[in-house]
Image (tube, helix red, strand yellow):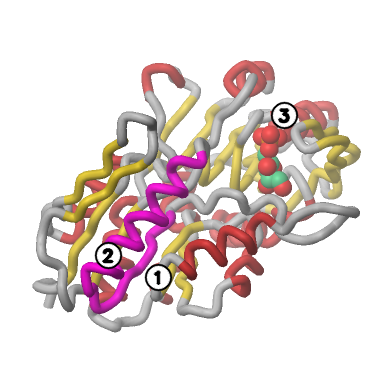
Amino acid sequence: MIDSLRLFAGNANPALAERIAGKIGIPLGKIEVSRFADGEIHVQIRENIRGCDIFILQPTFPPVENLMELLIMIDAARRASADRVTAVIPYFGYARQDRKDRPRAPISAKLVANLITVAGTDRVLTMDLHSPQIQGFFDIPFDHLYAQPVLGRYFEQKRIPNLAVACPDVGGIKMARAFAKRLNASLAVVNKRRTSADVSEAMEIIGDVAGMNVLLIDDLISTAGTLKNAALALRAKGAEGIFASCTHACFSGDALKNLEAAELEQVVITDTIPQEEQRLGGQFKMLSVGELFGEAILRIHEERSLSSLFV
Ligand code: R5P
């Protein structure tokens, strides 16, 4: 049933695109995503896709070129008479301003949702949104995957004794609770206060971590200030070994230095955002979500349920 299924990818994460195509068992679709001499994006789909079920893969981490490539690829597929166009966005960027929580602030996540819809998208497939409510910014079918089955399985196999799962801010409680349940661990919460867009401080720890190993869970690492502060606060409360697990490794600024200063046992990330693994060093472990996305795409194409992929 995969005859009409086509997977195209922009330039943001070619390695993940290959892994997903490998799982589905098809080659990546022929597409040229290049640049005009002045830097504008030039796209051309190089095969007939009339009546096809098109999946376009592109995580939208910075630079904004990644988002723009996605929009233009969607437009190309729509104008080439695709039957259905699904935007596959392993990391959904511009998600952090998701409500008007202070005067004269934008809701960037809604703006991006509008852009993706208006470009001609029929449905969206993504993973670990910064806040799940962003689904409601779309009025088209939306499938939301979790990296937890991949990350959780890894930590299950590690069998870390005497484990507490902690989230570095109250926004992450739901995600941390799912890990705690899976790993049969207790739950702790770091109460974080953000003093500006990229600076935060850990205020206090809710829950008991003294003498315990702790697994810190977050959806996103940017500067890693959040993780570093959380690790220091946990250690001050008597935590022993501290591990971190995060879906989207959007490293920026002093992220690597901050992670080193946090003295974590291990930082486990996924490949929603590409990384040069040698640059990261031995503290890191990268797990692929390629199989999960490949399976989800197959199921969407075959109109089968996705819910068994959530555990
Ligand atoms: C915040 O709500 C997110 O879940 C992350 O904790 C945050 O965006 C990480 O940012 P940074 O690494 O710059 O502290």
> Crowding at label 1, few (<14), some or many (≥20) Cα neighbours within 10 Å?
many
Q: Which mark identifies residue 19?
A: none
Residue 259 visible in the shown view: yes
Q: Is residue 81 magenta?
A: yes
**Type of amino acid at the residue the image marks with label 3:** Gly
Q: Please provide percent x and percent y for residue 17.
A: 27, 48
Q: Please provide percent x and percent y for residue 92.
A: 52, 53
Residue for point 38% across, 24% down: 276
**Type of amino acid at the residue the image marks with label 1:** Gly
**Which residue position holds label 3?**
225
Residue for point 62% across, 16% down: 257
Nearest to the eye among marks 1 and 3: give it. Answer: 1
Q: Please provide percent x and percent y for residue 123.
A: 41, 73
Labelled pair 2, 1 in contact (Cβ < 8 Å): yes
Give the distance between the C-alpha atoms of the residues marked 2 and 1, in whole angstroms.
Answer: 8 Å
Give the distance between the C-alpha atoms of the residues marked 2 and 3, in whole angstroms.
Answer: 40 Å
Quadrant for the N terminus in the image: bottom left
Nearest to the eye among marks 2 and 3: give it. Answer: 2
Q: Which mark identifies residue 77?
A: 2
Q: Nearer the viewer, residue 83 or 61?
A: 83
Q: Please provide percent x and percent y for residue 208.
A: 82, 45
- Assign a secondary structure to mark 1: loop
**Which residue position holds label 1?**
120
